[in-house]
Amino acid sequence: MTMTDSGGGPGSHPSAGPGSGGSTFAGRLQALFDERLNKDTEKKFTPEEVSAATGLSVSYLNYLLSGERDNPTMKNIQRLADFWGVSPSYFFDSAAPAGHASAPEADPDLAQITVLARNLPPGMPRATLRAIVEQVAALEARRNPPPRRGGRPGSA
């Protein structure tokens, strides 16, 4: 697999295309490409990398980025959402600020964990992962207890 981003070809500058702006599907997808870094390379993801991970063709991704295609199937939206670690509604939710997912989804570590977990087969592997995460959460809760609520008024 070659991972080039030479800046040429369709979709190389999608923000200049008809789908620019954070309120469109293209704008929100472009925001993910602009804001998220590949943990392995510390660079922005290329359409080639996203294509390899999602099974969507590079040309189709470029069409989505340029706004030339603006009605992807739910299956393709789910593939993109899984890759980026966002909810499918991220691409449509008018209440969400453009280019920004909700706080947990904006965490690149959680996004990567989510993608990896979704690729596990159902059953024991997922149950084991869930048990591990619950153990880590319990240990963290003991180390860093949440602030107490409901105390007497004026006591802080």
Image: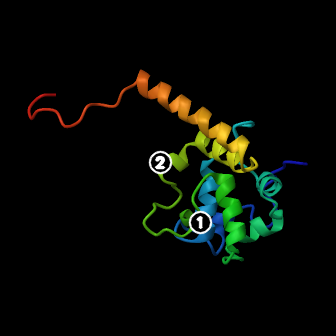
Query: Looking at the picture, how far across and down is residue 8, in whole percent?
Result: 81, 60
Check disc 1 and report the residue beneath it. Answer: 27
Could you tell me which residue is drawn at 82 percent across and 55 percent down? Answer: 48
42 relative to 99, above or below = above
Q: Is residue 52 left or right of residue 12?
A: right
The tag earlier along the polypeptide, 1 or 2, is 1
| Residue found at the far front of this picture | 124
Could you tell me which residue is drawn at 57 percent across and 71 percent down? Answer: 24
Kind of residue at badge 2: Ala
Check disc 2 and report the residue beneath it. Answer: 103
| Residue found at the far left of this picture | 154
Asked if residue 23 shows in the view, the reply is yes
Q: Is mark 2 on a helix, strand or loop?
A: helix
- Residue 97 or residue 16, whichever sits in front: 97
Query: CA–CA distance between discs 1 and 2?
Result: 19 Å
Kind of residue at badge 1: Gly
- Residue 133 or residue 50, whichever sits in front: 133
Q: Are marks 1 and 2 in contact (CB under 8 Å)?
A: no
59 relative to 4, above or below = below
75 relative to 39, above or below = below
Q: Please name the colour scheme applied to the rendered image.
A: rainbow
